[in-house]
C-alpha cells in the first residue's frame, strides 16, 4: 500500500488531481439512457459504458494515476490480478515505456491473459485464486524491488478509479443513485469518495458467492470470505482491506448481493438488447435490478455502471444462443 488514510473518504481534490493527471491517457467513456421496457427493465436508467475503456475495464484509471504519481524503480512494476487490473497495468506500462510483470491465478480468462501478453508484460500464471497470485507478486516485489501496484488498496488507485464518478457527474448531473459492482472495492471507494456528502447515493453490488465488502460492513472490519462465483476472475477479492472498508463504511449507502444466475442474465440482456459484450463482473451492477436486489423508487434517477468487457467469445456465443 502506498498512500493510506486513517479513515474516511478521499477528498474530491485528490480525484480532481487524478483526473487532470490521467486525462491524456484514458477514454471519456459514453453514457446511454434506457427507457422503461429496454432490456426488460421497469423504469428508465442511465448506463455508463466504462467497459469501453482501454484494456476493457475501468482499471487503467488507477494504473495510470499510480504510475504518474510515484517513482518507478529500474525493476519496473508488478501487479497481481484476476486479469483486468493486470491488463490495465500492462497497458499503462507499455504506454509509459516501463517494464511490467503480472501475476494471475489459473481462473483468469483467456482473453485477459491474451491482453496482458499483447501489451508486452511478463506474465506469471499460478495458484487457484487471486490471493495466491498476490502472494507470488509480493514475493517478487520483495526480491526485485519492483513497484507493486495494488488493484484496490492504495490511495493512488482509488483516486484514479474515482474519476469515473467525476466524469459521470459531468455527463449526467441529475443522478440520484448509482449501482457499482464490487470486487476488492477500489472502484466503489473512489466513486463514493467523489459523491460523499452529496445527493447521489452509491450502492455496491456483489455476487452472493464473493461478497468481501458486504461481509466487512456487517462485521465492522475487513474479514476474509470464501470466493466462488461466475464473476470470481474480476470480483474475487477475499478481503477488501482496511482502506476500502474505512472509506466504504462512511460513503457507501449499502451493498446488495445477487446470485450468479442474475449476473448471467444481465450479460445476456446486454448482448441481446444493446449488442454490448460484458464479462460477468461488468454486468453485475445491472443484475441487482434484474434480481430485485435493488428496487428504485418511483421517479428515481438511477445510474448503472457497466465496468468490464473482457468476456470469452465462447461464453458470449453460449449466452446469445
Image: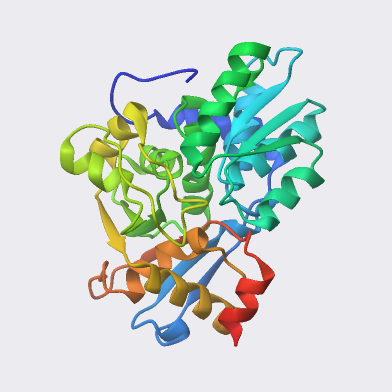
Q: Quadrant of residue 271?
A: bottom right
Question: From the viewer's perspective, is residue 93 above or below residue 188?
Answer: above
Please name the residue shown 17% across and 43% down the image. Answer: 218
Task: Measuring from the top left, give residue 52's x and y in whole percent.
Answer: 65, 59
- Left/right of residue 26 with respect to residue 185 in the rendered view: right
Task: Measuring from the top left, give residue 223's x and y in whole percent.
Answer: 26, 35
- Left/right of residue 163 with respect to residue 285 in the rendered view: right
Task: Measuring from the top left, give residue 276's x and y in whole percent.
Answer: 61, 72
Q: How is the image coloured?
A: rainbow
Quadrant occupied by the C terminus: bottom right
Please name the residue shown 30% across and 38% down the image. Answer: 248
Please name the residue shown 57% across and 48% down the image. Answer: 58
Could you tell me if residue 100 is visible in this image?
yes
Q: Is 143 in front, or is 63?
A: 143
Q: Is 152 in front, or is 317?
A: 317
Question: From the viewer's perspective, is residue 220 above or below residue 114?
Answer: above
Question: From the viewer's perspective, is residue 172 above or below residue 84?
Answer: below
Amino acid at each position: 500500500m502506498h498512500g493510506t488514510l486513517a479513515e474516511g473518504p478521499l477528498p474530491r481534490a485528490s480525484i480532481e488531481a487524478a483526473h487532470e493527471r490521467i486525462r491524456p491517457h484514458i477514454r471519456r467513456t459514453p453514457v446511454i439512457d434506457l427507457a422503461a421496457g429496454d432490456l426488460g427493465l421497469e423504469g428508465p436508467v442511465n448506463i455508463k459504458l466504462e467497459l469501453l475503456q482501454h484494456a476493457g475495464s475501468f482499471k487503467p484509471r488507477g494504473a495510470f494515476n499510480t504510475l504518474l504519481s510515484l517513482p518507478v524503480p529500474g525493476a519496473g512494476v508488478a501487479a497481481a490480478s484476476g486479469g483486468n487490473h493486470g491488463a490495465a497495468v500492462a497497458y499503462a506500462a507499455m504506454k509509459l515505456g516501463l517494464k511490467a510483470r503480472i501475476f494471475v491465478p489459473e481462473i483468469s480468462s483467456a482473453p485477459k491473459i491474451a491482453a496482458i501478453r499483447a501489451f508486452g508484460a511478463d506474465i506469471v500464471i499460478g495458484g487457484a485464486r487471486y490471493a495466491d497470485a498476490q502472494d507470488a507478486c509480493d514475493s517478487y516485489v520483495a526480491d526485485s524491488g519492483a513497484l507493486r501496484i495494488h488493484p484496490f488498496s492504495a490511495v493512488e488507485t482509488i483516486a484514479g478509479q474515482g474519476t469515473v464518478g467525476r466524469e459521470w457527474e459531468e455527463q449526467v448531473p441529475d443522478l440520484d443513485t448509482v449501482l457499482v459492482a464490487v470486487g476488492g472495492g477500489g472502484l466503489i471507494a473512489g466513486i463514493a469518495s467523489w459523491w460523499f456528502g452529496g445527493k447521489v447515493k452509491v450502492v455496491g453490488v456483489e455476487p452472493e458467492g464473493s461478497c468481501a465488502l458486504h461481509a466487512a460492513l456487517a462485521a465492522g472490519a475487513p474479514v476474509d470470505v470464501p470466493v466462488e462465483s461466475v464473476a470470481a476472475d474480476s470480483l474475487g477479492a477475499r478481503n477488501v482491506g482496511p482502506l476500502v472498508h474505512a472509506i466504504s463504511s462512511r460513503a457507501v449507502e449499502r451493498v446488495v448481493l445477487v446470485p450468479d444466475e442474475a449476473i448471467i442474465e444481465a450479460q445476456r440482456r446486454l448482448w441481446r438488447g444493446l449488442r454490448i459484450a460484458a464479462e460477468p463482473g461488468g454486468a453485475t451492477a445491472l443484475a441487482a435490478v434484474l434480481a430485485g436486489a435493488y428496487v428504485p423508487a418511483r421517479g428515481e434517477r438511477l445510474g448503472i455502471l457497466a465496468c468490464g468487457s473482457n468476456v470469452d467469445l465462447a461464453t458470449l456465443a453460449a449466452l446469445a444462443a
